[in-house]
């Protein structure tokens, strides 16, 4: 299976399936002499675990990371860093009833079309479980960019049709949805509970902000940093749209409204979301990811079996109701990887 590696100088390969022995990542190109402990990675993994937030499934993935290579006496050596996370709470029997059916909205149908073989236990590589490996690798990338003063933070701006009030700046640690608008968070939680009772699921929008990023990162043509960010975030299961800065709103603005006037102290506004012509401007980078509702739902739906016969399906396993908030550390991880890659590429030419 191709396409398991991401990045040019800071390269991440993820491997493993949801119901196999383990998932993991190999990070190649990480600079040497960087302090790195399992605990640095564990902190990030704990934020992605199931059971976090009202939308989460009751699965108990212990998600303990082991660093197998590339670190000596707490410092990176410059050799490939291999990260392993064992799959401890597998319950493959949950999938017995689904083995001959395709879950609407999931990758079951397309995986079989592509490979002619499908592991029906969990979603295989299409499972949210694969993102544990991304979060582990992203923690290494975060260390690389932290050295340059770059910080990445994600939060919830919409869930189940409830949107935060524009400019909300509340403490995202005060609610389980990492939402800066406490009142909106309460409504979101109500919607989640209602969806759970109905055997349904919900989608939402996550915003990721990058502060402290210097101007000049990114390549001007095919590897524009906004193009790489869009690919990185869109490669996460459930993400169906990515916006940078004003995003889709820019299409209905006039040039005089959308341009960010330049003054001696910098830019007056930031509709560009910190990126111009594929290169960072030094302003805050603003990315939004629209996530679809979780496909595996208990509500009955139409599908077909392996022979094309019409069937009904109701998915009973332990599934999330919404990818938010668990997708937030995954989005952050992918953004950290892109920034680490472009930081190293910029250092290589300057
Ligand atoms: C952190 C995370 C957790 C997820 N949990 C589930 C889940 O419990 N059940 C499910 O059906 N899909 C889950 N998904 C979504 C599927 O992985 C995704 O919808 C599927 O791979 C199909 O890909 P697509 O949505 O990009 O089309 C999760 C995704 C992420 C990122």
Image (spheres, helix red, strand yellow):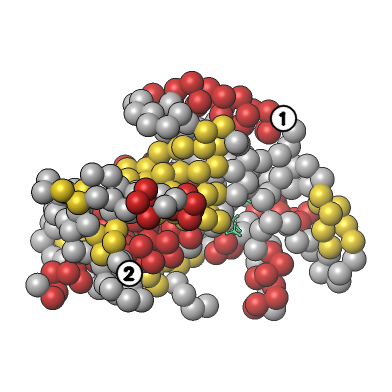
Q: Residue at 23% across / 44% down in the picture?
A: 268
Residue 307: quadrant of the picture:
bottom right
Q: Residue at 50% across / 43% down in the picture?
A: 205
- Residue 62 locus on image (x, y percent): 45, 44
Residue at the limit of the structure toward the right, as seen here = 309
- Residue 237 locus on image (x, y percent): 54, 57
**Label 1: few (<14), some or many (≥20) within 10 Å?**
few
Q: Residue at 21% across / 48% down in the picture?
A: 267
* Secondary-structure class at tag 2: loop
Find out if the beta carbon at label 2 lies less than 8 Å from the nearest ligand 1 atom: no
Find out if the beta carbon at label 1 lies less than 8 Å from the nearest ligand 1 atom: no
Residue 30: quadrant of the picture:
bottom left
Q: In this rendered view, identify the residue nearer to me: 146 or 120.
A: 146
Labels in figure, total: 2
Q: In this rendered view, identify the residue nearer to me: 126 or 94.
A: 126
Q: Nearer the viewer, mark 2 or mark 1?
A: 2
* Secondary-structure class at tag 1: helix
Dividing the image into 4 quarters, which one contains the C terminus? bottom left
- Residue 97 locus on image (x, y percent): 78, 54
Q: Is residue 331 visible?
A: no
Up-down: is 186 above or below 94? Answer: above
Disc on the earlier residue, 2 or 1:
1
Q: Which residue is mark 2?
A: 224
Q: Is residue 296 visible?
A: yes
Q: CA distance from mark 2 to mark 1?
A: 44 Å
- Residue 67 locus on image (x, y percent): 29, 58
Dot 2 and dot 1 residues touching (CB under 8 Å): no
**Label 2: few (<14), some or many (≥20) within 10 Å?**
many
Q: Which residue is mark 1?
A: 197
Q: Residue at 42% across / 52% down in the picture?
A: 254
Please tell me the numbered disc located at residue 349.
none
């Amino acid at each position: 299976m191709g396409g398991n590696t991401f990045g040019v100088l800071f390269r991440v390969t993820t491997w493993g399936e949801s119901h196999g022995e383990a998932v993991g990542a190999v990070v190649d190109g990480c600079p040497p002499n960087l302090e790195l402990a399992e605990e640095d990675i564990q902190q990030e993994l704990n934020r992605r675990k199931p059971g976090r937030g009202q939308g989460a499934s009751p699965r108990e993935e212990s998600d303990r990371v082991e660093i197998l290579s590339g670190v000596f006496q707490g410092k990176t050596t410059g050799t490939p860093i291999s990260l392993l996370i064992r799959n401890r709470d597998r319950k493959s029997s949950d999938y017995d009833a689904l083995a001959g059916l395709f879950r609407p909205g999931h990758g079951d149908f397309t995986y079989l079309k592509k490979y002619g073989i499908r592991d029906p236990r969990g979603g295989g590589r299409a499972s949210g479980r694969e993102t544990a490996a991304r979060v582990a690798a992203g923690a290494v990338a975060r260390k690389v960019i932290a050295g340059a003063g770059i910080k990445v933070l994600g939060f919830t701006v919409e869930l189940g049709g409830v949107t935060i009030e524009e400019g909300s700046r509340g403490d995202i640690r005060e609610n389980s949805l990492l939402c800066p608008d406490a009142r909106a968070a309460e409504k979101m939680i109500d919607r989640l509970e209602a969806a759970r009772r109905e055997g349904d699921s919900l989608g939402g929008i996550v915003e990721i902000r990058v502060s402290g990023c210097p101007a000049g990162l990114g390549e001007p043509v095919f590897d524009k940093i906004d193009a790489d960010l869009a690919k990185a975030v869109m490669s996460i299961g459930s993400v169906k749209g990515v916006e940078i800065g004003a995003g889709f709103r820019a299409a209905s603005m006039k040039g005089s409204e959308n341009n960010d006037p330049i003054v001696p102290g910098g830019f007056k506004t930031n509709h560009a979301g910190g990126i111009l012509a594929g290169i960072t401007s030094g302003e805050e980078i603003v990315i939004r990811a629209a996530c679809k509702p979780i496909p595996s739902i208990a509500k009955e739906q139409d599908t077909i079996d392996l022979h094309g016969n019409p069937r009904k399906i109701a998915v009973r396993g332990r599934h999330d109701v919404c990818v938010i908030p668990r997708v937030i550390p995954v989005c952050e991880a992918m953004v950290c990887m892109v920034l680490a890659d472009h930081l190293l590429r910029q250092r290589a030419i300057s």
